[in-house]
Image (cartoon, grey):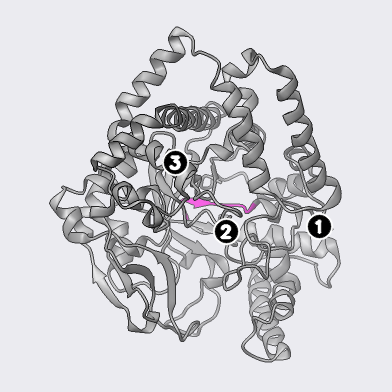
């Protein structure tokens, strides 16, 4: 499993060797502990604090002073076996096993006294984060004793401000300090990763991701329960793709309580993330305007839209971004009510445009030529919820969904529609001179088509253009397949090449296929940050 040291290496290499302007990651929010842990980064325990599972243990200064070297060596051996299982035996990323190892190592590191300078920096972090960090660390300590769903804790501990909670915190102060220190260490390494990107010449650096909500049993829902609507969860209304609607199981913020507080929880959340972000992607940015609330025990079809004060929330968002000197990218895919994109654009918030969705929906429905795209967006060929470009070009994404029983129409019909969709795009690429003299289904043709897709993106006026790393090495698999839980290995797949072999960061940096893609994108005229 990659770590924050790898992220810094990736940013440094991409900035210097590829002239990349940014590296975008999925949410690094703290997960809800469990057996097994939910691998999705979009249902976290806390959005305010990052997950220490991403720490590079060897980069923590106290690592050099651990006294029990024998135990540390045993952990390194177990770590090597996990790595071998993924790289050589095709195993999935085992987040729980990774965390078990890192937790044991961090226990050893935290036995090492901090030097005076380090102690002063840690104390500054504690003072700066204040009550929010104390609450988060307290929840983590209590979860070790009582489980990770605070609704099932002893009654007195369900209130973060109760006398029982204060006594429990005092009795668990060593664990509260442990979790506080992990938050500090993770914040330090995240800051270092952003610094590595900027020092490598990136104008943006690391683009972090803000999930739309939090787990109902997690740290944020416990500490900020006055701001969450009890008995409600966020979802989506029925639409053409899902007649039953969706229930995401995430408690929504109460707009009245946010307003009464001067939007303090939202402001503090943004400020925490902008500490180490060159840009922030807001998942389901339409949620700043309205959210579909679903009453507990009722189907999503019985939900309703609840509106937020978008004017104020956008003002808070752009103010904090301006203070941090950072960009904001809104994920505005799917059903968007009229006026939302205009409101975002007026405030300098970029949208998200994915090639396969960019068609003239109000006209003939054909693919939009590059000069018809909007400029205020991040343009990409795919996302974590969509097939890789190689899979879409070959139709393998249809075969995968068929094998998992996810198709709602006959396979032949789905294949034909997918082929027609891809064919229209390839015809446009050819007409623009981006795909000359290619054809067939061989690997060279596939690589040429992927290159053409990204060269097309560079011809749009989009301010940012993103390359999905798996597209650089020909990975066929989606990272996440919506509509599945245990049928597919969501969020546990290591990046792999076209043959399904896992690719290390070193392999990635040396990949001829990736370098050929980058060279195809190098044009004399200046383009957007990539």
Give the quarter of the figure containing the N terminus. top right
Q: Examine the rendered structure and indicate whether residue 411 appears above or below residue 153.
A: below
Q: Secondary structure at mark 3?
A: helix
How far, Cα to Cα, is label 1 from label 2?
Answer: 27 Å
338 and 297: which is toward the camera: 297
Q: Residues within 10 Å of mark 3 (few under 14, many from 20)?
A: many
Q: Which mark is residue 140?
A: 3
Q: Examine the rendered structure and indicate whether residue 343 appears above or below residue 327.
A: below
**Residue 76 image point, x, y percent:** 75, 29
Answer whether residue 35 is visible to the viewer in this image. yes
In the rendered image, which residue does mark 2 sit on? 457
Mark nearest the camera among 1 and 3 is: 3
The reply to whether the magenta stretch includes residue 201 is no
Q: Examine the rendered structure and indicate whether residue 66 appears above or below residue 397.
A: above
Q: Residues within 10 Å of mark 2 (few under 14, many from 20)?
A: many
Q: Residue at x 42, y 30 (%)?
A: 180
431 and 241: which is toward the camera: 241
Q: Are marks 3 and 2 in contact (CB under 8 Å)?
A: no
In the rendered image, which residue does mark 1 sit on? 500
Residue 259: quarter of image: bottom left
Label located before the other in sequence (3 or 2): 3
**Residue 309 image point, x, y percent:** 19, 60
Magenta residue span: 462-468
Q: Residue at x 58, y 22 (%)?
A: 109
């Amino acid at each position: 499993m990659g770590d924050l040291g790898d992220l810094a290496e990736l940013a440094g290499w991409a900035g210097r060797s590829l002239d990349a302007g940014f590296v975008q990651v999925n949410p690094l929010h703290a997960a809800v502990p469990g057996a097994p842990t939910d691998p999705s980064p979009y249902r976290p325990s806390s959005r305010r604090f990052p997950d220490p599972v991403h720490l590079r243990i060897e980069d923590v200064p106290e690592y050099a002073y651990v006294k029990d070297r024998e135990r540390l060596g045993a952990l390194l051996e177990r770590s090597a076996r996990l790595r071998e299982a993924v790289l050589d035996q095709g195993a999935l990323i085992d987040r729980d096993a990774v965390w078990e190892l890192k937790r044991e190592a961090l226990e050893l590191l935290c036995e090492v006294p901090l030097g005076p300078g380090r102690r002063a920096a840690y104390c500054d972090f504690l003072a700066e984060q204040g009550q929010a960090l104390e609450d988060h660390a307290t929840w983590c300590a209590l979860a070790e004793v009582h489980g990770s769903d605070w609704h099932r804790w002893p009654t007195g501990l369900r209130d973060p401000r109760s006398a029982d909670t204060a006594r429990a915190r005092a009795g668990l102060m060593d664990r509260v300090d442990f979790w506080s220190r992990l938050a500090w260490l993770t914040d330090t390494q995240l800051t270092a990763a952003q610094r590595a990107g900027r020092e490598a010449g990136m104008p943006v650096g690391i683009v972090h991701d803000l999930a739309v909500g939090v787990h109902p049993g997690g740290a944020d829902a416990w500490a900020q329960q006055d701001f969450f609507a009890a008995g409600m969860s966020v979802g989506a209304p029925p639409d053409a793709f899902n007649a039953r609607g969706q229930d995401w199981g995430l408690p929504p913020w109460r707009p009245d309580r946010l307003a009464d507080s001067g939007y303090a929880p939202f402001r503090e959340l943004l400020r925490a993330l902008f500490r180490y972000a060159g840009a922030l992607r807001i998942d389901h940015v339409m949620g700043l305007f309205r959210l579909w609330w679903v009453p507990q025990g009722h189907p999503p079809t019985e939900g309703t839209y609840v509106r937020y004060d978008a004017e104020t929330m956008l003002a808070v968002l752009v103010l904090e971004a301006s203070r941090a000197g950072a960009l904001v990218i809104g994920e505005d895919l799917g059903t968007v009510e009229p006026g939302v994109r205009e409101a975002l654009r007026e405030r300098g918030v970029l949208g998200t445009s994915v090639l396969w969705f960019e068609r003239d929906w109000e006209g003939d429905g054909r693919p939009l030529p590059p000069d018809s795209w909007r400029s205020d967006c991040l343009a990409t060929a795919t996302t974590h919820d969509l097939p890789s470009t190689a899979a879409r070009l070959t139709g393998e994404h249809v075969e995968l969904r068929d094998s998992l029983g996810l198709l709602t129409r006959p396979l032949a019909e789905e294949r034909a529609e997918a082929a027609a969709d891809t064919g229209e795009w390839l015809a446009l690429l050819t007409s623009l001179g981006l795909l000359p003299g290619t054809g067939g289904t061989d690997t060279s043709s596939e690589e040429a088509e992927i290159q053409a897709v990204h060269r097309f993106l560079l011809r749009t006026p989009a301010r940012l253009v993103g390359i999905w790393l798996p597209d650089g090495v020909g990975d066929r698999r989606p990272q996440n397949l919506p509509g599945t839980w245990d049928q597919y290995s969501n969020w546990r797949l290591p990046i792999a090449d076209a043959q399904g072999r896992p690719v290390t960061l070193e392999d990635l940096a040396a990949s001829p296929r990736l370098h050929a893609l980058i060279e195809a994108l190098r044009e004399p005229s200046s383009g957007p940050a990539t």
